[in-house]
Image: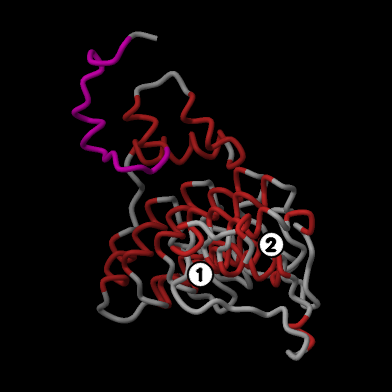
Amino acid sequence: MSGGHKESPQDNAHRAGPVVNFTNPLMSDLESDWSPLHDAAFNGHILTLHGLVAQVNLPTVDGKTPLSEACAQGHLTCVSLLLQNGATSTGTGMSDSPIHKAAAKGHPECIETLVKHGADVDQRFEQSDSPLHIACINQQLNTVKKLLQLGAAVNCSVAGDSPLHVAARLSSPEMVSVLLEHGADGSLRNPAGKRPLDLAAPNSPAERLLGNNRGVPCLMQLCRLYIRKTVGKKRIGGIHGLHVPTQLKRYLLYQSVTLGDLIHYQPMAEKPF
């Protein structure tokens, strides 16, 4: 490598394993059409990527783009650079959908960046799974939380199964709890007539959570869900700019604030607006 293209510490920091180089003419057709841009994005080589962004949307034979591969590997700096230089944030199918790749592999920071550049948090292709379904299926809890914070539709069904059905079938109490907190409907039935409760393992923590969630949510929770629905997923980020107390904004955004924090909050401490 020439002196003008030395790799930075960031490049080397992303190398958890050996560098993967698919741009080899002796490899199979599905691999040999990878460009140097794909290699740089896959391996997290940000300086190399800088010099190759003119090919930013170049796909492989099977539809993979540099952005989708950077998202699959969780290379956030590369994702940002590609998007800033015109990479398409949406993809045309499951094989090249950056947000689905990030959801499957558990890279919430990449998802947040994609959404800021126009990706649909509920993106689907015909009858494909939503990013939220993909994250649930792959048990990526932090990614599930991020998608829901960004306004993903919690009750969207795929082949009749809601994300809560998926979480119940996996008997994941953490995932069930997060979905319920974001307004998941435990009474929904799939085509087999099963509610999420019917799919959870008997006597499991997930079953107990679902069994105890049969009443009406508290008023503060209902208000949060209604406000977020009214704002809409495309304007969720605008909650930061509302002229309301910081604790209330954090509550609406599902950040660390709790109901107790709001109940005991002293409004006199806030500056008037």
Q: Is residue 210 left or right of residue 116?
A: left
Which residue bears the numbered disc 1? 105
Which residue bears the numbered disc 2? 124
Q: Quadrant of residue 173?
A: bottom left
Residue 131 at x, y percent in the picture: 58, 62
Which image quadrant: the C terminus?
Answer: top left
Q: Residue at x 55, y 64 (%)?
A: 44
Q: Residue at x 48, y 52 (%)?
A: 148
Q: Is residue 69 left or right of residue 23?
A: left
Q: Amino acid at mark 2?
A: Arg
Which residues fall within the magenta stretch? 253-271
- Per the image, label 1 sits on a secondary structure element best described as helix
Q: Quadrant of residue 49?
A: bottom right
Q: Amino acid at mark 1?
A: Lys
Q: Is residue 19 magenta?
A: no
How dense is the environment of label 1, judged by Cα within 10 Å: few (below 14), some, or many (20 and up)? some
User: Is residue 180 shown above or below 162?
Assistant: above
Q: Nearer the viewer, residue 21 or 6?
A: 6
- Per the image, label 2 sits on a secondary structure element best described as loop
